[in-house]
């Protein structure tokens, strides 16, 4: 990635993290980059209306232009438009957390996250990547999207770290689990990535791209509902794959 692009993104993420106006020296110190480089990025963002000076010597802060641009992009995202209603319906029917991720190779990035009303819940930030290919159901689904030969190649490179007492650490056993999930169209993680957490993930294809829908909840709440949750999840993914009526 271009250094200027990386630094611009670092700027925006820094303001989100710090949640306060920052001076040029603050930015330089917090990002560990030269003041001159900070000045160039800051000046460009200020000229485009994305950052303003709060007051003389009062530091800089993003304007609402960034929010408006992001809002417009989000409102016109074809995947979000297509999935938002169905995934909200799934969340409401189950009252458990529902997540949407886009797959690119071995990486899955979360695009939508709908939370349950329960105080005890699993939360995932939009923009985060799927972790633990060997333990998380979304990670298993990514592995399940590979051909048999590609799956074997990836398994050779994976380190199957035990995250809980239930994590599968045998590559033979993991391969068998992946193949079973692929056959069912449903991947399950019960206490394998986090103790006390169960997740179910189903994939769907849209416009030649792979997406994943995950339902996540405490095992104590989900264990007795696995059949119901799995059936609703698969039905939602079938609807998401259907071409919209014209």
Image (cartoon, rainbow, N blue to C red):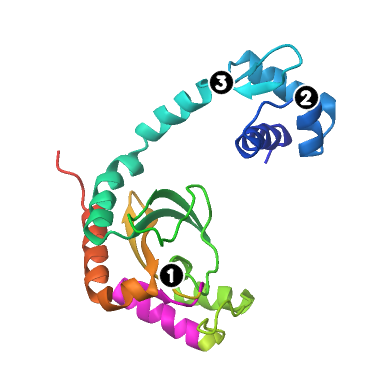
Dot in front, 2 or 1: 2
In this picture, which residue range is highlighted in magenta? 173-194
Check contact, mark 2 vs mark 1: CB within 8 A: no
Dot in front, 1 or 3: 3
Residue where numbered disc 3 is placed:
63
Q: Earlier in the sequence, mark 2 or mark 1?
A: 2
Q: Is residue 55 left or right of residue 156?
A: right
Query: Image quarter for residue 78?
Result: top left
Q: Position of residue 150 (x, y in %)?
A: 51, 72
Foreground residue, 208 or 168? Answer: 168
Q: State the mark number for residue 137.
A: 1
Residue where numbered disc 2 is placed:
24
Check contact, mark 1 vs mark 3: CB within 8 A: no
**Distance Cα–Cα, label 3 vs label 2:** 16 Å
- Magenta highlight on residue 164: no
Q: Is residue 5 left or right of residue 65?
A: right
Residue in view at x 85 percent, y 31 percent: 34
Q: Quadrant of the N terminus?
A: top right
């Amino acid at each position: 990635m271009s250094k200027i692009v990386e630094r611009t993104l670092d700027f925006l993420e820094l303001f989100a993290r710090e949640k306060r106006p920052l001076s040029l020296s603050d930015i330089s110190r917090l990002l560990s980059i030269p003041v001159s480089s900070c000045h160039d990025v800051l000046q460009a963002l200020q000229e485009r209306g994305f950052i303003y000076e709060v007051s003389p010597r009062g530091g800089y802060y993003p304007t609402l232009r960034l929010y408006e641009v992001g809002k417009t992009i989000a409102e016109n995202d074809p995947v979000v438009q297509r999935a938002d209603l169905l995934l909200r319906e799934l969340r409401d029917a189950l009252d458990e957390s529902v997540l949407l991720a886009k797959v690119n190779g071995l990486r899955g990035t979360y695009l939508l996250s709908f939370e349950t009303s329960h105080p005890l819940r699993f939360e995932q930030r939009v923009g985060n990547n799927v972790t633990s290919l060997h333990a998380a159901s979304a990670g298993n689904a990514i592995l399940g999207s590979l051909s048999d030969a590609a799956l074997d190649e990836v398994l050779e490179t994976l380190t199957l770290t035990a995250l809980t007492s239930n994590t599968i650490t045998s590559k033979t056993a993991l391969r068998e689990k992946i193949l079973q999930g692929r056959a069912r169209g449903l991947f399950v993680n019960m206490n394998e990535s986090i103790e006390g957490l169960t997740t179910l993930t189903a994939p769907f294809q849209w416009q030649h791209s792979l997406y994943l829908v995950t339902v996540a909840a405490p095992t104590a709440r989900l264990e007795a509902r696995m059949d119901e949750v799995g059936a609703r999840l698969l039905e939602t993914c079938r609807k998401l794959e259907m071409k919209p009526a014209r």
